[in-house]
Image: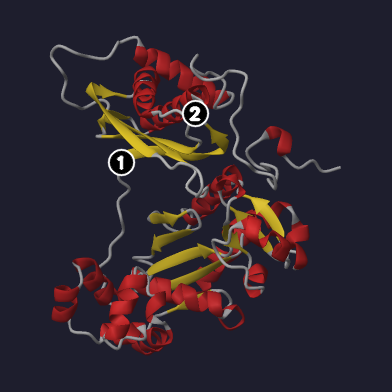
Amino acid sequence: MYALVDCNNFYASCERVFNPSLQKKPVAILSNNDGCVIARSDEAKALNLPMGAPIFKWKNFCKHHNITILSSNYPLYGDMSARVMTILEQFTPNVEVYSIDEAFIDLTGFDQRNFNEYGKSIRQRILKWTGIPTCVGIAPTKALCKVANKIARKFPKETGGVYVIDSEEKRLKALKWTAVKNIWGIGHRLEKRLLLKGCKTAFDFTQLSDDWVRSNFSITEWRLKKDLEGIPTIGFEIKEIKRSIATTRSFEQSYSDIENITERISTFAAQCASKLRAQKSSCHMIIVMLRSDRHKKNAEQYSASKTIIFSYPTDSTLNITKAAIEAIKTIFKKGINYKKAGVIVTGLVATNNHQLNLFLHENPKHKPLMSAIDHLNKKFNPTTIKLANQDLQRTWKMKQEHLSPKYTTKINDIITIK
């Protein structure tokens, strides 16, 4: 048996833990630079505030309906997510973190337990220790766990936030209740194709022949079908090293000068290098991208990218930022208002196990230097030490006009009890 533990309205719930005045009130969380709605509380959903709504178009709507608007507070959400996942590890050693607000747990060997009571104990401990409400779906396969979790979320009073599919009768009933568009892994295009075939529910999908599914879809959809039939086919995923690392951001405002663009690219490249060292990887290539503001239709549009290949794999901030600046200078075009840029490092290999170049190699002084920089930045502040090509007097920030305090990750924002 498996269980899927999903946090309810996670971003809004994190805000409510430290600001109880938001309980049972409509809350909307905005994307980077306060662009559009990326998360809503149930109360905001009931008011028909759409997901992805550009906030500048819906600001009056939110004001009229007293919807609290908040900027994304990722340090808070990430820390609360880590706390939830740590609690789950107390219930089973096998936890697959599926996203920031949900995880699968393997309950193999727990057959003697009452799964419904076990699910409730998981919910109660997470709620007591973090204040985050959750729902738990338990079933013989991961795909059925998703279905069970949706049932627990849809009918909280009847299920107590926990639903267990532990019989053939429950499985069939759950599949007939689940619309095809709500099947885990079925996107908009696949939904259209299945509807043309007469599949309106998950049960209809399981009634298709294996041969037809494999000939008209991919092996992924066939595995999903078998999983919904109660045959475990989608196993636990082993956490793999990332094959590429990207840092892309929209600027707080448009820039047309090479100085500001270069500083931004240097900062992105430094972040990529730091992430590389964190996973003990080095890169063979770097890709730098630059783009104008596509929302300004009357302005001249421009988009370009440049790839630079290193002679040897590197994780040095010095080497990576130098290459990034060289790349940006070749694609920069005067007279354009730029709104977004990015750096991608790819061609990753293990730092301690890769093919060496007989004639070219990295400066051996870079390793201890990068280690010292990482240590100091981790101990004090991520921006304690910067490169000279970064503006030492400027702290780059996203547009976050509705940002709540970083209650758990910044010492000055910790709640003081008087």
The reply to whether the C-beta atoms of the residues labelled 1 and 2 are less than 8 Å apart is: no
Q: Which quadrant holds residue 11? A: bottom right
Provide the residue designation for mark 2: 264
Relative to residue 345, is residue 69 depicted above or below?
below
The kind of residue on which mark 2 rests is Arg
Residue 106: percent from left, percent from top: 37, 62
Relative to residue 350, is residue 211 depicted above or below?
below
Asked whether residue 168 is in view, the answer is yes
Q: Pick whichever, 393 or 11, lies toward us.
A: 393
Q: Which quadrant holds residue 343? A: top left
Q: Pick whichever, 33 or 159, lies toward us.
A: 33
Provide the residue designation for mark 1: 241
Kindly state the secondary structure of the residue where label 1 is placed.
loop
State how many labels appear.
2
Extreme residue toward the right, this view: 418
Tell me the quadrant of the picture where the C terminus can be found.
Answer: top right
- 10 Å neighbourhood of mark 1: few (<14), some, or many (≥20)? few
Residue at x 53% of width, y 18% of height: 385
Cα separation, mark 1 vs mark 2, equals 26 Å
Q: Which quadrant holds residue 16? A: bottom right
The kind of residue on which mark 1 rests is Ile
